[in-house]
Amino acid sequence: MRAPLFAFLLLAANAAAAPPAADPLADEVARWDTFLRTHVAAGPTDTLWAEVKQGSEPALQRTQQALRDRHRLLALLRLSVAREGLAAAAYMSQRTPAERTERAPFEAEWARMGGVLRAALAPPAPATLEGLRPALVRALAEAAQPQVKVYYDASLDYGRSTTPESGLYYLGSAQAAQEFVGFLRTLPAHEAAAPPRLRALGPDLDALEGEMLAAYRPPLSIDRHRDFILAHSALKEARELDALGLRHGALLRYLQAAVRFAPLRAPAPAVAPDLRLRLDRLAAELGRERADHSIARLFLEVAEADLAEHAQEGAAVNAAAVAADVLPRYRAALGPAPAPVPRPDPRVTVTLVRWPYT
């Protein structure tokens, strides 16, 4: 049975937990669910749709589960992942066979989309998103906005080096990021508390990267290589956002990197028997403060979902990490910057080439 205090705090602190008569979040989830169930491949050569559906379907189901559990902040985060491939597929469904298979029509479409996305291709200024509330909504918008240019720039090279269809997918992803920012602007700003004052996260990011590098040793670095890549990818994105002055987005990605790294620690964080009580206390502390802690509340919802899924087998590693590591990192990020972590002089320079956000 869920602890009463934790449940109360999550519902009371998250003003979006009681959906209004018109619920943009639920409507958006339903829209993409309908698309997922009704969309058909463009033809026998349309292999991308099968891949998109395979990845998006479980992500959308997890989004719907979060809505049913009244974890609306978590549902919004999961929607940001689930809708990207679906929105790209929707864009591709409107392209001609020539655009999907021939280089010249593809490049003409790439040029056309440059005009459609022009306003979003400029370097994002923090001030353009400062009116978004609560802080988590602004964080998601700040994380999505730079993706427009990253995906747009990558799409041309990808289309030339692989197939025009693959390049179109990244064009669709660029448009999906732009549309997601627009969707976030439609959400009602329920949070009345003052937004958090955020600082640059350079020393915090350095410290977490140092922990990752220390843990990246065989056999773990071999057995769990993909998990290390995902954790470090979030950390790299946090650095990029921090350099742009997009502090909310940087904080979100930094804390996500900490969650992804948690199962890779040696030893992994212990799942204490009183974990739920610890989370209750942390929720109560946030609830007593008249501040917009929606980013922190997101991770409380992450912990609650993890407990509901894994508590019986004692494997709620993410919930344990939220209590012992992630929320302390959040608190530290709101305070003065820590002393810089000494970094050894590099002996070798290695350049890694990757596609966007992989």
Image: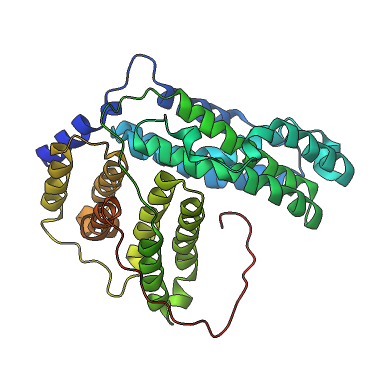
Q: Is residue 248 left or right of residue 312?
A: right
- Quarter placement of the N terminus: top left
Where's residue 61, x and y in %?
Answer: 43, 39
**Residue 54 is at least partly visible in this image:** yes
Residue drawn at the location 54% of the way across and 85% of the way down:
347
Q: How many marks?
A: 0
Residue placed farthest to the bottom in the image?
A: 347
281 versus 95 height, above or below: below
Viewer-closest of 199 and 229: 199
**Residue 1 is at least partly visible in this image:** no
Where's residue 183, x and y in %?
Answer: 50, 28
Where's residue 312, x and y in %?
Answer: 20, 54
Residue drawn at the location 40% of the way across and 35% of the way down:
137
Q: Is residue 54 left or right of residue 24?
A: right
Name the image colouring: rainbow
- Quarter placement of the C terminus: bottom right
Q: Image quarter for residue 35?
A: top right
267 versus 24 height, above or below: below
